Image: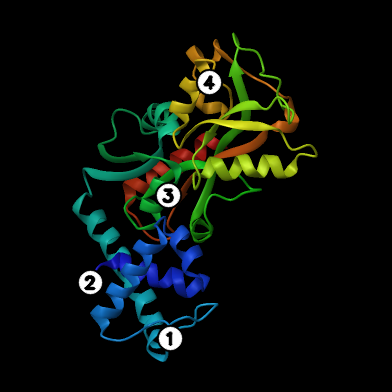
C-alpha cells in the first residue's frame, strides 16, 4: 500500500469529482483512477459508488475516510519527528522550489542562515505544478513558489502556513529589437503569443489576466512551454509576446526584452513560502523564522 493512494482518496472524498481530484493531485485522470482502484483492491472492497455524480462514498468508504485521514497525518508527523531527532545536529532541510525561484532566490535563502549554521539541504526543483504536488505529498518541508491572491496556487495549500516574502509582477514582454508586434492585436493582424502550456499555473494566471480585460487580445499561438526560462529565451529571440514573472527576467535579459501593454495587462503576484502546520524540527523552524524576519 502506498501512502499516496490514501492522499488520493482523501482528495476525492473532499472534492467529490474525479477530474478535479486528479488535477488537485497533479495526475492524469486515468492515473488517478488506477490509484483509487489499487487502494480498493488492497482493501478488498469498493470505496466509491460507481457512476455517481457528484462522487459518493460507499458505506465502507465512509468508514475508511477517518482512518485514512488519521493514518496520513500520523505517518507524516512520525516521519517529521524521526527526521528531527535523526538530524538534530546536522539537519537536512527539504526544500521545493520552482525553476524561476531556484535561480533568483536560493542564494539569498542560504545567506539567511549564514555560513556558520550546520545545515544541509535537499532541493527539489521543477515547474510550479510539479513542486507543489511533491510538497503536498510530504516530500518537502518548505515550498517556495509564486502565488496570486486573485488566482490561488492550489487549494490544498490553504491547510498550510503561508509567508509572503516579497511582491512580483506577471506582465507581457517583447524583444526590444522586435517591437510590440501590434499588441494587443486585431483579428486581421493577431500578435504571436509565447505561452505557457496548459495545466501550468502561469497559464491559469494568463487566463485570469484576459478575463479582467475589457478587450480580449487577438493572438496566434507561436510557442508553448511550461518553463519560464525557455519562454524567456524565445521572447529574447524576437519570436513574439509572452507573459513572464518579473523575477524571471535577469539583468542580461532585461537589456534585451521590455514590458509592453501598460499596467492593465499586468498582474500583481506574491513570492511565498509554505510549510505544514506541524512540527518539522529546529532547523526548519530556524529557516522559517529567518524568512519571516527578512520579509518583515
Check whether the beta carbons of the residues at disc 3 and disc 2 lie within 8 A of each other.
Answer: no
Residue at image position (44%, 30%) is: 105
Q: In the rendered image, which residue does mark 4 sit on?
A: 235
Gap between marks 2 and 4 measured at Cα: 46 Å
- Quadrant in the picture for residue 30: bottom left
Is residue 105 depicted above or below 148 in this figure?
above
SS under mark 4: helix
Q: From this viewpoint, which residue is outermost toward the front?
A: 188
SS under mark 2: loop
Gap between marks 3 and 1 measured at Cα: 28 Å
Determine whether, in the image, residue 24 is placed left or right of residue 173: left
SS under mark 3: helix
Gap between marks 1 and 4 measured at Cα: 51 Å
Residue at image position (43%, 27%) is: 230
Is residue 2 depicted above or below 51 in this figure?
above
Q: Residues within 10 Å of mark 3 (few under 14, many from 20)?
A: many
- Quadrant in the picture for residue 49: bottom left
Q: In the rendered image, which residue does mark 1 sit on?
A: 62
Gap between marks 3 and 2 measured at Cα: 23 Å
Foreground: disc 2 or disc 4:
4
Gap between marks 2 and 1 measured at Cα: 19 Å
The way the protein has been coloured in the rendering is rainbow
Q: In the rendered image, which residue does mark 2 sit on?
A: 1
Residue at image position (50%, 81%) is: 52
Q: Count up the numbered dots.
A: 4
Is residue 57 depicted above or below 127 in this figure?
below
* Sooner in the amino-acid sequence: mark 2 or mark 1: 2
Q: In the rendered image, which residue does mark 3 sit on?
A: 132
Quadrant where the C terminus sits is top right
* Sooner in the amino-acid sequence: mark 1 or mark 4: 1
* Sooner in the amino-acid sequence: mark 3 or mark 2: 2
Amino acid at each position: 500500500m502506498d501512502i499516496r493512494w490514501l492522499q488520493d482518496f482523501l482528495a476525492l472524498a473532499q472534492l467529490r469529482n474525479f477530474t478535479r481530484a486528479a488535477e488537485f493531485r497533479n495526475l492524469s485522470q486515468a492515473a488517478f483512477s488506477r490509484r483509487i482502484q489499487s487502494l480498493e483492491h488492497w482493501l478488498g472492497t469498493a470505496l466509491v459508488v460507481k457512476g455517481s455524480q457528484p462522487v459518493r462514498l460507499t458505506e465502507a468508504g465512509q468508514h475508511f475516510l477517518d482512518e485514512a485521514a488519521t493514518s496520513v497525518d500520523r505517518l507524516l508527523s512520525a516521519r517529521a519527528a524521526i527526521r528531527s531527532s535523526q538530524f538534530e545536529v546536522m539537519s537536512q532541510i527539504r526544500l521545493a522550489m520552482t525553476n524561476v525561484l531556484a535561480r533568483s532566490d536560493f542564494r539569498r535563502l542560504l545567506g539567511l542562515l549564514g555560513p556558520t549554521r550546520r545545515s544541509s539541504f535537499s532541493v527539489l526543483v521543477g515547474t510550479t505544478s510539479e513542486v507543489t504536488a511533491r510538497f503536498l505529498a510530504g516530500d518537502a518541508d518548505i515550498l517556495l513558489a509564486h502565488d496570486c491572491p486573485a488566482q490561488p496556487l492550489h487549494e490544498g495549500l490553504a491547510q498550510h502556513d503561508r509567508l509572503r516574502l516579497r511582491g512580483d509582477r506577471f506582465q507581457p514582454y517583447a524583444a526590444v529589437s522586435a517591437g510590440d508586434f501590434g499588441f494587443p492585436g486585431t483579428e486581421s493582424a493577431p500578435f504571436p503569443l509565447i505561452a505557457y502550456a496548459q495545466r501550468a499555473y502561469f497559464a491559469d494566471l494568463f487566463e485570469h489576466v484576459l478575463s479582467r480585460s475589457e478587450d480580449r487580445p487577438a493572438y496566434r499561438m507561436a510557442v508553448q512551454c511550461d518553463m519560464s526560462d525557455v519562454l524567456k529565451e524565445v521572447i529574447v529571440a524576437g519570436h513574439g509576446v509572452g507573459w513572464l514573472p518579473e523575477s524571471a527576467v535577469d539583468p542580461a535579459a532585461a537589456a534585451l526584452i521590455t514590458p509592453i501593454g501598460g499596467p492593465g495587462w499586468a498582474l500583481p503576484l506574491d513570492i511565498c513560502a509554505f510549510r505544514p502546520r506541524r512540527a518539522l524540527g529546529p532547523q526548519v523552524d530556524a529557516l522559517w523564522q529567518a524568512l519571516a524576519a527578512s520579509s518583515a
